[in-house]
Amino acid sequence: ETTVAQFRAFVQATGTQTLAERRGGGEVYEAGWVRKPGWTWRTPFGLKANDDEPAVHINFHEARAYCQWAGKRLPTDAEWVSAAYTEQRERPTDGYVRGKTYPYPVGDAPDGMNNNRRAHVAVATTKRGVNGLYDMGANVWEWMADRRGDEALTAGGSWWYGPAQARADGAQWKAASFHAVYIGFRCAYDLNP
């Protein structure tokens, strides 16, 4: 997941001001969507974020712009599913089996994911998952490159949701302009053949 420190470097280099900042705060669900004054990627819960926290309150367009700035791109859903659920390493670690497709990004059970909690945790502090990746299940939803009109796909679930949303079929469409306390992103890049 893209961290606060990484996103800060982008903001400093480009002068970007996020939609959450321009609107005076990000969104959270409290028996309906509520804008929280001052809640942005810098202060996700109204308090200053640590550098290693995931950058949240970022919409699809902002996530895509960051990835382009970094020389990368948002992953597609197909890439996400392949990386998050099917072990592909020659010599897997942590008990994973090459070629096996798991129901969760951390294996056969959701143990070790940050879901059904009160907040996100620092990037790469949850259980290491399939293909040696961190935070592919829970912690924060992540924007995908896939679009459907004015919507973009998010995958992985988050700390707000239970384990079902972290499964491959748990991806959800959200308005591309939407930003919330539990949505972040990561970038992908193409390997040169």
Image (spheres, rainbow, N blue to C red):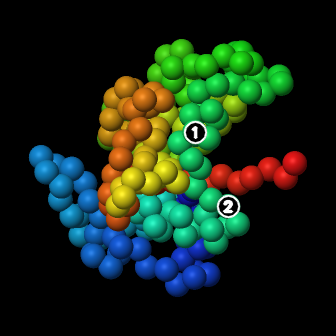
Q: Nearer the viewer, mark 2 or mark 1?
A: 1
Residue positioned 13% across, 51% down in the render: 32
Could you tell me residue 56's position as x and y percent?
43, 58
Answer with the quarter of the image where residue 83 lies. top right
Could you tell me residue 106's position as x and y percent?
56, 25
Q: Nearer the viewer, residue 192 or 122?
A: 192
Could you tell me residue 47's position as x and y percent?
36, 63
Could you tell me if residue 186 is visible in this image?
yes
- Disc 2 residue type (three-letter): Lys
Residue under label 2, please give it. Answer: 72
Residue farthest to the front?
A: 149
Answer with the quarter of the image where residue 101 lies. top right
**Real-space Cα distance between discs 2 and 1?**
17 Å
Q: Nearer the viewer, residue 61 or 27?
A: 61
Q: Is residue 142 above or below residue 55?
A: above
Q: Is residue 65 above or below residue 125?
A: below
Residue under label 1, please give it. Answer: 78
Circle 1 packing at 10 Å, graded few (<14), some (14-19), many (20+), is few
